[in-house]
Image: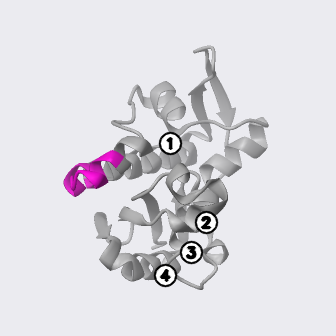
Amino acid sequence: MKNIVYFDLETQKSADEVGGWDKISAMQMSVGVTYSTARGDYRIYGEREVQELITELQRADLVVGFNVLRFDYEVLHGYTPLDLTQVPTLDMLVYLAEKLQHRLSLDSIATATFGLEKTAEGLQAIRWFKEGKLHEIAEYCCYDVKLTRLVHEYGLSQKQLHYNNRFGRKLTVPVDW
């Protein structure tokens, strides 16, 4: 059985706090979450377990995420000399942006496809970190991983995804992953 690992992480600091988007590796992970199809469960990693998270990603047959190449992997590059972009990865944001010539949010896809919305956003997770609310971050991150998994599995089975454009119109895009 192929081990697909769905993945997301949240950070301790914003781009503003580290001096800009070119310093993503300095943002530091607060919580990382994976769902492994081989295990059939979620794993939650704090910053102290970041090496275990990196090992899980390296061992996956495929890592699936949303903006993982430009963001999540860059955060993890602050903890490892390994080039995580070499891990077999489906970054659904990159895939869809190449296909549509514009970026979509995970929220616009989940809302149009399932009627589900994200429970928070990244800046809220940073505020929670500063307040010591790691449980809330883990819950939010798990939900994002679940949405990522649902979107990927829907695309696999239906060969298409739905999304709401910036005018609120529901559109469909074919996918072949």
Specify the amino acid type for callout 2.
Answer: Thr
User: What's the distance in space between the residues labelled 4 and 1, CA to CA?
Assistant: 24 Å
User: What's the distance in space between the residues labelled 2 and 3, CA to CA?
Assistant: 15 Å
Residue 61: name its quadrant. Answer: bottom right
Q: Which residue is identified by label 4?
A: 59
User: What's the distance in space between the residues labelled 3 and 1, CA to CA?
Assistant: 30 Å
Question: Disc 3, disc 4: CB below 8 Å?
Answer: no
Residue 99 drawn above or below residue 79? above
Specify the amino acid type for callout 1.
Answer: Tyr
Q: Residues within 10 Å of mark 4 (few under 14, many from 20)?
A: some
Question: Disc 4, disc 1: CB below 8 Å?
Answer: no
Specify the amino acid type for callout 3.
Answer: His
Helix, strand or loop at mark 2: strand
Q: Which residue is identified by label 2?
A: 89
- Looking at the image, tell me whether mark 2 or mark 3 is earlier in sequence order: 3
User: What's the distance in space between the residues labelled 3 and 4, CA to CA?
Assistant: 17 Å
